[in-house]
Image (spheres, rainbow, N blue to C red):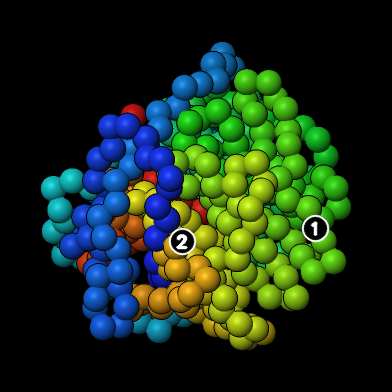
Amino acid sequence: MLAAAIVGVVRFTPNILPPGIMTLIPSQLLAPFTSPTKSDLIPSATVALPTATEVITVTETLQPTITPTPTIAHTPTLPPVVEVTATPDSTAVVVPTKIGGSGQIAFASIRSGMPQIYLINTDLTGLTLLTNMEEGACQPTWSPDGTQIVFISPCKGRGEFYENVYNNSSLYIINADGTGQKPLTTVPGSDFDPAWSPDGKRIAFTSLRDGKKDIYLLTLETGAITQLTTVTNDVQENSQPAWSPFGNQIVYTVKRFDTYQVWAMSDTGQGNAQIARSGQNFWDFLPVWAPDGATILFSQRDVGVASRPWLMSIRYEDRETKDPVRLDLPRPIEDVQFSPDGLWLVFESTDSEGNRDIYIMTASGGNRTRLTNDPTVDFDPAWRPNP
């Protein structure tokens, strides 16, 4: 289920922090997550990312090969407002010594004719094909230990958040080298937007199995599936789940009164609360929780027109008293995810020709680098956790 835009910030202070906490995002490195006056809205927060306790062991081996049979047409995308200047074929970009732990990005691409999952290093080397699904594959999400990927198939192409394009899709899992492919869900009804929990034991996902978009939870050990949200008279859809670093909350997208909003709930589906109140003129979507446990970023766009998404930021504790902040970053920017150390962002964006590719930049908006440069669509980036 990470193009250029603007972000908002949220502060969440849990009642109990786990032992062995460590500072993940120094406030001085989060310059983008500030108000227009540059005041620091994100004091240092400390968390310890849980270590996955379960790894699915499989023996089936997938030998990925490319079958160049184009079956899907490239959908033109609006060109960005700001021209991209940092590209892999331009002057080398100077970056901080530490770059997101493993420095590898999984993403989906249509370069072989049908979407498949690829892996690339953040130094622009090591492009590797991981899947060879006849009906396509996309939406890769890493296990917390960085050894496995959950993804969906069929996937005919990149879908917008307001579309229902993943018909009959199911969840699959593979090892980081592309071996050991295994289905996780087989119930008809379209399962997509997978999000692996920080403890490695559960996967949240969106499904149409009951006729409308709702969020479910798969327990990997037992295979049990629990419904977390329910469409109501005023709520038309629930989708795009993303975990808090503590594993006890999920932020997600709600379609309500024909407007898309960002909400949060507990990992049991309780305590549903609206995070950002952006009004009827904007759509909020693709939320992600920062590693500090306090900040939520999400993309925003104008309603009813073809606009280029920007990035917003808001603190969880400010959800009832303050509006989200638009970040001063080139757009479009969407499908944003943090690096494991919290110092970098990976996201989708488009160049002046409208070509959609994968980019990275520091959390403060510097060192913007284009990782992919293919004439087809590259999308759904996911930063590999520290192995």
At a point 43% along the width and 47% down the height, the residue shown is 14
- Identified by mark 2, the residue type is Tyr
Closest to the camera, between mark 2 and mark 1, is 2
Residue nearer the viewer, 131 or 334? 334
Image position of 322 with respect to 374: above or below: below
Image position of 182 with respect to 2: above or below: above
Query: Nearer the N terminus, badge 2 or badge 1?
Result: 1
- Identified by mark 1, the residue type is Val
Q: Where is residue 19 in the image (x, y as percent from the top left)?
A: 32, 32
Residue nearer the viewer, 37 or 358? 37
Q: Tell me the element at label 2.
A: helix
Residue beneath disc 2: 316
Looking at the rendered image, the quarter that the C terminus falls into is top left
Q: Which label number is shown at residue 231?
A: 1
Q: Position of residue 112 (x, y in %)?
A: 54, 49
At a point 72% along the width and 27% down the height, the residue shown is 224
Residue 177 appears in the picture as rendered: no
Residue 238 appears in the picture as rendered: yes
Q: Tell me the element at label 1.
A: loop
Image position of 52 with respect to 130: above or below: above
At a point 13% along the width and 48% down the height, the residue shown is 97
Q: Residue 30: which quarter of the image?
A: bottom left
Residue nearer the viewer, 174 or 31? 31
Residue nearer the viewer, 264 or 134? 264
